[in-house]
Image (cartoon, helix red, strand yellow):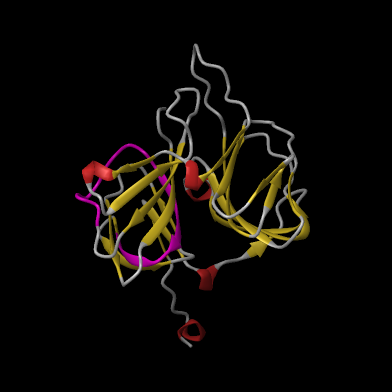
Amino acid sequence: MMKELGATRSAYRADHLLHTADTFVRAPLPEMKNATAIVHIAPAAGAKFTHYTAEFSAGGELGPCAQSRFIYVMSGEVSVGDHLLSVGGYAYLPPGDATKVSAAVPAQASVIEKEYIPLAGYKTPSLLIGSEDTSPSSQLMGDPWLEVRMMIPADPSFDFAVNTMTYQPGAALPMVEIHVMEHGCVMLAGGGIYRLGDSWYPVTAGDFIWMAPYCPQWFGALGKTPAKYLIYKDWNR
């Protein structure tokens, strides 16, 4: 196997990271119970947020978080307080929210944590529970082959956004984007080619990508099935 020769698809550059499963390191975060984390990106690498995959065993639980936290269920079921979230379910927890996040059965969730930036004239958002299949849907720049679903309301009280983007086979971003926002991106299904900086990477379900502000970025879907990812951006700040 190529990994025995030190080869990997993973790559870390000043303005981007591609994190692939062959390089994942698992370790529990403070006060996790019967759960572990794959930390994909964190401030130690230059990001202004932390993005990790939480893997719950039966009876697993996340520890408390002083920052704002977003959770998207990728497999199994996760409870946020009295709300039971299945695959595609999500929750936003405001900074310091003590609502218990747990799983009675094995599950996986994508978790984003960041310091909340208040905005004058707006209150800190409250706990938000939702499901991807009932979230607002739109076409990116009118392209019917590229669907965007918005998880976080377009409300200035929120200091980031999380969307899913689904590309039909052969669909692609209409331009190479270069902008002030940074991204965390989890490939949920399918695959394709991602341009990051001056490099081109094949990507597939399970991969994670971090893009720093002003990193040139572009994606095109390949294969016979749709490609889909969950993407974070520090929008509206």
In this rendering, the answer to whether 131 lies above or below 4 is above
Does residue 137 show up? yes
Percent x, y for residue 151? Answer: 48, 40
Q: Quadrant of the C terminus?
A: top left
Q: Report the residue that reaches farthest toward the front.
A: 134
Splitting the image into 4 quarters, where does residue 220 fall? bottom left
- The number of numbered discs placed on residues in the rendered structure image is 0
Q: Residue at x 28, y 65 (%)?
A: 169
Q: Report the residue that reaches farthest toward the top.
A: 121
Q: Residue at x 49, y 42 (%)?
A: 134
User: Quick check: is 174 in the magenta stretch?
Assistant: yes
Q: Residue at x 39, y 66 (%)?
A: 190
Q: Is residue 179 left or right of residue 25?
A: left
Splitting the image into 4 quarters, where does residue 181 fall? top left
Percent x, y for residue 233? Answer: 42, 40
Q: Is residue 192 left or right of residue 206?
A: left
User: Quick check: is 42 in the magenta stretch?
Assistant: no
Task: Tell which of 10 and 53 is nearer to you.
Answer: 53
Percent x, y for residue 71? Answer: 59, 46
Task: Tell which of 162 and 195 is nearer to you.
Answer: 162
Task: Tell which of 227 and 86 is nearer to you.
Answer: 86
In this rendering, the answer to whether 48 lies above or below 8 is above
Q: Report the residue that reaches farthest toward the bottom.
A: 1
Q: Residue at x 71, y 63 (%)?
A: 106
Percent x, y for residue 75? Answer: 60, 60
> Where does the magenta region start and end?
172-194
Does residue 70 show up? no
In this rendering, the answer to whether 178 lies above or below 201 is above
